[in-house]
Amino acid sequence: MTPPVRVSPNVVAALRDGRAVVALESSVFAQGLPQPENREAARRMVAAVHARGAVPAITGVVRGVPTVGIEDEDLERFLARDGVRKISARELALVAVTRGDGATTVAASLVLAHAAGIAVFATGGIGGVHRVAPDLPEAESAVRDESADLDELSRTPMVVVCAGAKTILDLPATMERLESLGIAVVGYHTNELPGFLTRGTGISLAWRLDSVAEIAAAWRMQGSLGRTQSIVVVQPPPVERALPREMVDAAVNRALEAAARANVHGAALTPWLLSKVEQETGGASLAANVALLESNAALAAEIAMEVGKPVEIGRARA
C-alpha cells in the first residue's frame, strides 16, 4: 500500500539519521499573511530552523498528496495562493481524494507531522474559542465558534511552540478549554500567557520553564506516561515588535464589529479578522506577526535539537 503521507527526501534523511526536524504549517503563508510578507515569513522561519541545526518541514496537501516537506515549485504555488484551499484536519482526506492543494492549519499540520514521526511544531498562534462582537446581544453569543486546533492538540502528542492563541480570540475561554482537554501550557521565560501580538494578557500560567532541556525532558516524560496530548510552549513576541494591549484590544473589537456586519464566519473569519486588525494598527500587527513566527521557529528548532539527545538515566534535580 502506498504510504498516506509523502515525506520529502531531506526530511526522511534527517529522521533516519536522528537529526532534529521542525514541522511548519502552510496556511499561515497561503492565507494568514498577505503577499509579499508571506514569502518573507516563510524565508525567515526556514532560515531560523536551519540556523539552529534543525531541518524545516512545511506541511500541506500537494495535488492530492498529504505532504511533509513542501519545497521548490510546490511551495511557490502555495505562496502565490494559486487555487490553494485552507484546510483543517477534517478536510485532509477530502482534499486528497479530489486531488486538490490544501494549506494546513495547526490541526491538520499536527496530523501530518505526527504521521511522519516529527515531535516539534512551530506556528504563530494556535486557534481557540472565538470572541463575539461587543454590540451583539447575549442570546446571539450563547454558542461560539471553537477552533479544531484544540481537539487536535488533545489527541496528538507534539511540542507546539507559539505566541499563545491568536489575539482575535477569547483568551480566558481558550485557556479554560485547554485545561479541560488536559493540554499543558508552559511559559518559556514567562509567567503570563502572551497575547500573540502582545507580550502579556494578565492571564497567569501555572507552569514556567526557562530551558529547552527542561521542555524536552517534560516531553519525554509525558510520552513515557502514555499521554496523547500536545505540550503547548508559549513565548512572548519579540519585545521590539510587540504591540500595546490597549491598541490590540481596540483594533480587535472594531474588527469583530465589522465582521458581524459583513456576516463573515467559519474558516474565512480568522484571516479576515487578522487583515482588519492589520489595517486598524497601520501595519504594525503584520510586522509583529512575521517577527514572532521567526522567533517561534527558532525556539522550536532549539527544542527539537534537545529532544533528539540521548536521555541520561539517574540524574534528578531536587
Image: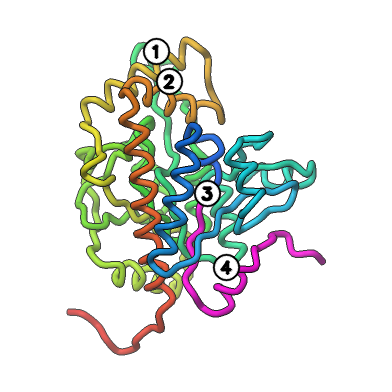
Which mark is in front, 1 or 4?
Answer: 4
Determine the CA span between mark 1 and mark 4.
Answer: 44 Å
Residue underneath mark 4 = 117
Q: Do the residues labelled 2 and 3 touch (CB within 8 Å)?
A: no
The image shows residue 265 at horizontal and vertical percentages of 53, 23
Determine the CA span between mark 2 and mark 3.
Answer: 30 Å
The stretch of residues the image draws in magenta is: 1-24
Amino acid carrying label 1: it is Leu
Q: Which element carries disc 2, helix, strand or loop?
A: helix
The image shows residue 136 at horizontal and vertical percentages of 39, 13
Amino acid carrying label 4: it is Gly
Position of 65 relative to 283 (above/below): below
Q: Which residue occupies the extreme left position in the image?
A: 318
Which mark is in front, 2 or 3?
Answer: 3
Residue underneath mark 3 = 25
Viewport quadrant of the N terminus = bottom right
Q: Which residue is drawn at 50% across and 26% down?
A: 269
Closer-to-camera residue (30/304): 30
Which mark is in front, 2 or 4?
Answer: 4
Q: Is residue 238 left or right of residue 268?
A: left
> Is-magenta flag for residue 280?
no
Residue underneath mark 1 = 136
The numbered mark, 1 or 4, whose residue comes first in the sequence reads 4
The numbered mark, 1 or 3, whose residue comes first in the sequence reads 3
Amino acid carrying label 2: it is Ser
Residue underneath mark 2 = 141
Colour scheme in use: rainbow
Q: Do the residues labelled 4 and 3 touch (CB within 8 Å)?
A: no
Amino acid carrying label 3: it is Glu
Which mark is in front, 4 or 3?
Answer: 3
Q: How crowded is mark 4: few (under 14 residues within 10 Å), some or many (20 or more)?
A: few
Viewport quadrant of the C terminus = bottom left
